[in-house]
Image (tube, rainbow, N blue to C red):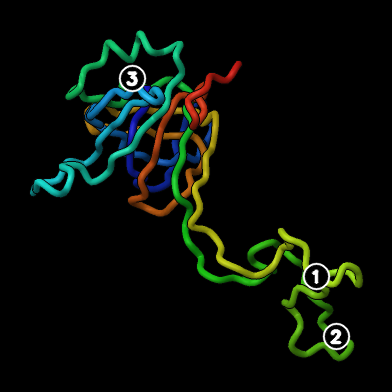
Amino acid sequence: MFLLGKKIGMSQIFKDGKVLPVTIIEAGPAEVLEIKTKPYLALKLGFERLKKQTKTHPPFRFIKEFRFPEELLEKIKEIKVGDKIDVSFLPEKVTISSISKGKGFQGVVKRHGFKGGPKSHGQQDRLRHPGSIGPSYPQRVFKGRKMAGRMGNKRITIRNLEIVDVDKENNLIAVKGSVAGSRGTLVEIRPSYITQKGKLIKI
């Protein structure tokens, strides 16, 4: 089942005599707002209901659509508008999408891991420069060349993340490994066998 959440932070859990790094996520409860069948199949969820409701602004802080395949249409129809989805509906492995931390305009050493220039032989101000950026022919820079630019603040999807622990009373889940984004970042949770475009993945 699909779910919206918020990243709380990272911690560690002792399980079977091993230390597992985990990410704590406040997952749901999310309210079903709409079940779309045309022009595509999608489930619209709302997360974090606002205290003050206006006619122009929706009553939820976050609203997202999750596409699903036709094979799950009969199961999705069992859900009604207004139902709430919580952590008890999640499978063991999930796919999580979120926005990574923005790091601003960065050079090639930090952004792409360039080695930089030599630190001797007359080099003074070119230690972290990219060096040559193109051939003698053609006289232009090829598209896609790794150069300085904005770093981070991109949508990152991590598949097959294992849910280590679930706290149903507080709507918290502990996911093994790291999840992109800072504290408070919106997190989209979907089953690992469904892509973002709502297609099934053969496992």
Q: Amino acid at mark 3?
A: Phe
Between label 3 and label 2, give the one nearer the viewer: 3
- Of the numbered discs 2 and 1, the one sitting upstream in the chain is 2
| Residue corresponding to mark 3 | 89
| Residue corresponding to mark 2 | 120
Q: Secondary structure at mark 3?
A: helix
Between label 2 and label 1, give the one nearer the viewer: 1
> Is residue 96 left or right of 137 when viewed as pictured?
left
Residue at x 39%, y 30% (from the top left corner): 66
Question: CA–CA distance between discs 3 and 2?
Answer: 60 Å
Q: Would you call the spot at circle 2 few (<14 residues within 10 Å), some (14-19), or many (20 or more)? A: few
> Is residue 114 left or right of 72 when viewed as pictured?
right
Residue 77's spot in the image, x, y percent? 29, 12
Residue at x 37%, y 49% (from the top left corner): 185
Between residues 16 and 123, which one lies in front from this camera angle? 123
Residue at x 8%, y 49% (from the top left corner): 52
Please determine whether, in this image, residue 156 is positioned above or below residue 160. Answer: below
Report which quarter residue 160 is drawn in: top right
Q: Amino acid at mark 2?
A: Ser
Residue 197's spot in the image, x, y percent? 49, 30
The label number, if any, that marks residue 140 in the structure image: 1
Outermost front residue: 39
Residue 173's spot in the image, x, y percent? 36, 32
Q: Secondary structure at mark 1?
A: loop
Q: Amino acid at mark 1?
A: Arg
Question: CA–CA distance between discs 2 and 1?
Answer: 30 Å
Q: Secondary structure at mark 2?
A: loop
Residue at x 34%, y 30% (from the top left corner): 3
Report which quarter residue 27 is drawn in: top left
Please determine whether, in this image, residue 167 is positioned above or below residue 154. Answer: above
- Of the numbered discs 3 and 2, the one sitting upstream in the chain is 3
